[in-house]
Structure formats: C-alpha cells, structure tokens
Amino acid sequence: MKDLEELPFYLRSSGIVFNGETCSFESANYVILGIPYDSTVSFRPGTRFAPFQIRRVSEEIESYCLKKDVDFDTVRICDLGDVITLPPVEKTIKRVYNVISAIMKKNKIFIAIGGEHTVTLGEVLAVRSYSGSDFKLVVFDAHMDMREEYPSGAKLSHATVMRRIGDVLEFDNICFVGTRAVDREEIEFRRSINFGNFIDADIINQKQRSVVEKKLKKFLHSGDKVLISIDMDVLDPAFAPGVSNPEPLGISPHALMNILDTIVTMQVDVLGFDIVEVSPLYDYGNITSFLASRIIKDMICYLESRNKSR
C-alpha cells in the first residue's frame, strides 16, 4: 500500500480484515486498527486474540443499520491490520501513539480493537498531540481503573490506566458510564479530587434515561472533540461473558447503543473510539465477539449518518 510508506507505522497484517473487505488508506474515512495486547491482564488473559476474532465474526453479521438507514457496506473503511506489540507496556503504548497519530494527521476517524484497556493511554496521547488538551474522554467500563498501582509496584496496567490518563488529561475531561465495580482506594481518590463525571450502572438499569442525558449534556457540548472507550465488561456478563474481568449487574447492549446514539446526536466531534477487553478464550459461542462487531458497525453507521446530515 504505497500511501502508507511515509507513515511511521509498526504494523503487520492480521490475516483477515473487518467485514471481509477494505479500501485504500487514502480513500477511507474510517480506519480500523487491531492492538493484540494483554500483558498486564490480572485475571483472564486472551484479549490479544480479540482483534482477529472480532474481525472473523464481523463477516457473518448483516451490515445494514435500520436505526440510521445506513448500509455499512457503502462506508469507506480501511483495515490497517495490527500493531506489533511488545514488552514492556510502555513500548506498546508508544507504538499505539505513533500509529494513531499518523492516522489522525490524515484526518481519519480511528477505531481501535483491543487488546486490554491499557492501550487507550496511547490513543489519548495521540489525540492530545493532534488536538491539544481540549478534548473529552467518555469511558464505558464496569471498573474505574484508577488505582495508583496494580499489582503493587506497577504504575501502568489495565487497572491503573485511567489514573495515568488523568495525569495527562485533566480528570474533569473524563466521564465514566456504566461503572459499578470499584476499590476503596478509587473511591477515596475520587472524593479527594471532587470527581463527579460518573454515571453508574444502577442509574442506567433503572431506565432513568432523562438523568443519563442530563449528565451527558452537562459534560459534553456541541463541537467538543471526543474520544470514546468501550470496555466490554460494562455490559452484564449475561450479554458479554467473554471479557477479562466480568462483573455482574451490568448494563444491556440496548442501553449502551442508546447512550452512544445520544452522544453522537449531540453534534460532538468524535475523533475515534475503541473496543477493549474482549477475551475470546472465555467467550462461549463467540457471543461477546459478535456483540463487539455489531457495536463497531452500528457506531460507524451512527457517525456516518450524522456526518451526512451536516
């Protein structure tokens, strides 16, 4: 692919592309990237296999989005393959940063398929380099991932990634959605910084949609630059069993998609989004991989519909 030769990519072919086809990087509006990494996972490993598996099942899911009247098959998408990850974690984060930075310089919307949640730090650093610190991060996650260290001595892991992101992006620019599993240390830290951008799973599950929308509209405003991170464990394990750290009493896929739709229709500038923490080794019947693929397709269709209406 000649149009990639000048970009500092650290990529290799995944052997399969999302939805079974890909256009050239230069002609694409959206760019898909796999990040097969799980070196800091603390419970159930296997997220390094997620980019391949999510791509594989994507071909078996119909592509028309009835909600937005958009055919995913008509959207110009380039699948670049996978970042070549390597230890230590800081080196993989740097490579993610390099690749995402190169994509954004070409004014493409990126979709990153993890991989563990730590990879989101590389995305945040790239977005900050591209647009400055003036952007918002919306995180769908069962956990806060705001420990100072986990395990002891590890400053950067999937359980500390949001703390590290807060070190480079002010915490006021981060909003958690669907969270329900926290450590006392995280609660104490949240109180110490008076952190309030928090929509817990209970509010969503009680179907208090007006409360959810009010909180989102307080955090996001028209024209805001936004990065969205979707940890699949935000969903209840009944819907998404194949994740690294499942937590009961999660939200439903319908609730997740309704909230994503709300964000997109707020006329914010979505720069990219990721899907992380799918662990195919524990994914009975590929349920979680199918759902992740569906989320990617529909989210792109939401964005495409909004962009066409402008």
Image (cartoon, rainbow, N blue to C red):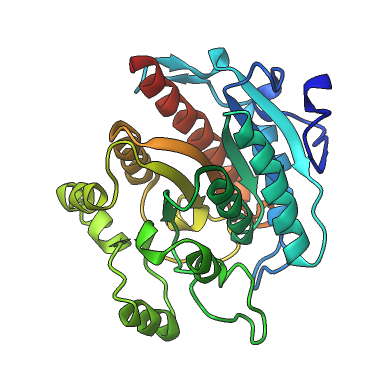
Q: Residue placed farthest to the front in the image?
A: 132
Residue 136 is situated, as x and y percent measured from the top left of the image, at: 40, 50
Write the residue at 51% across / 78% down.
Answer: 147
Q: In this view, does 239 lie to the left or right of 42?
A: left
User: Quick check: 212 above or below 24?
Assistant: below
Name the residue rendered at 40%, 85% in the picture: 184
Query: Which quarter of the figure has residue 204?
Result: bottom left
State whether residue 191 appears in this view: yes
Where's the N terminus, which quadrant? Answer: top right
The residue positioned 31% from the left and 32% from the top of the image is 267
Considering only vertical position in the picture, is 53 above or below 158?
above
Q: Residue at x 56, y 43 (%)?
A: 130
Residue 235 visible to the viewer: no
Q: Position of residue 308 (x, y in %)?
A: 39, 15
Please tell me which residue lies in front, 183 or 272: 272
- Relative image position of residue 201 (x, y in whole percent): 32, 60
Looking at the image, residue 74 lies above or below residue 183: above
Q: Is 14 placed left or right of 96 in the picture?
A: right
Q: In this view, does 5 lie to the left or right of 101?
A: right
In percent of width and height, residue 57 lies at: 65, 33
Using the image as rendered, state which of residue 142 and residue 165 is in the foreground. Answer: 165
Q: Quadrant of residue 93?
A: bottom right
Q: Is residue 101 above or below residue 205?
A: above
| Image side of residue 202 versus residue 252, left or right | left
